[in-house]
Amino acid sequence: MAFMAILLLAACTKDSSTDSFLLEDIEAKQNGGNRVTRPISNSLQSDPDPSLPPLACAGGAYAAGGALFYGTITHLGKVTGNVVNQSCELLSDGRLKITSKDRIIAANGDFLYTEGTIYVTVVSAETATITGGSIITGGTGRFVGATGYFIYENMVVDLVTGHESHTSYGEITY
């Protein structure tokens, strides 16, 4: 009965594309609590977090203090979250290297924590591209002790508004 209640609750809070993985994960954890490793991907958009001051970069540049994001991530469903930039450095090739600590809030309220490193390349007065990725460093609920990574792709930021969008892929163990 408890298993059905968990399934019903999960079905109500998850994106339908994650249901088969969720069922497999629940069954694996009930049969000995084994951690599972799965591919993970996302489609996210973000805007600067107005509550954070700009971050001064070594070399005289500035970066946003962080961002608020939303979108979807496999195994998490619809998500929201925040990025808090930790350091910024102007590299000799003109790119900015920014490190961050990120908190992702899953559809069911579980948190997933990551630490990111991005490289920002300005391509015009209005646009920059970003490469990089993040390491999964744990979380809450079913993501306690989670590990893994994301590799960012198709990451573009509007330098006028600060709006950014990207997809990513990787792997998660939880």
Image (tube, rainbow, N blue to C red):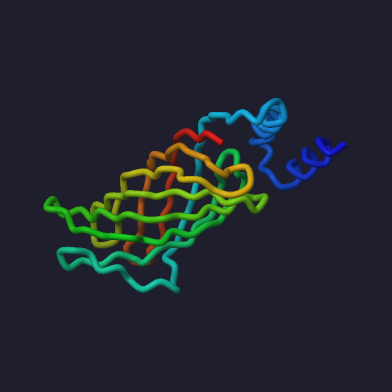
Residue drawn at x 58%, y 31% as measured from the top left? 35
- Residue pushed farthest front? 32
Quarter of the picture containing the N terminus is top right
- Residue pushed farthest left? 92
Report the label total: 0
Quadrant in the picture for residue 131: top left
In the rendered structure, the answer to whether residue 168 lies left or right of residue 8 reads: left
Q: Is residue 151 above or below residue 165?
A: above
**Closer-to-camera residue (161/70):** 70
Q: Is residue 163 above or below residue 131?
A: below
Residue 111's x, y, as percent? Answer: 57, 51
Quarter of the picture containing the C terminus is top right
Residue drawn at x 62%, y 50% as measured from the top left? 110
Residue 121's x, y, as percent? Answer: 24, 52
Q: Is residue 141 above or below residue 63?
A: above
Residue 136's x, y, as percent? Answer: 45, 43
**Closer-to-camera residue (167/57):** 57
In the rendered structure, the answer to whether residue 66 lies left or right of residue 25 reads: left
**Closer-to-camera residue (162/136):** 136
Residue drawn at x 38%, y 42% as measured from the top left? 152
Q: Is residue 5 above or below residue 81?
A: above
Residue drawn at x 53%, y 55% as measured from the top left? 70
Quadrant in the picture for residue 124: bottom left
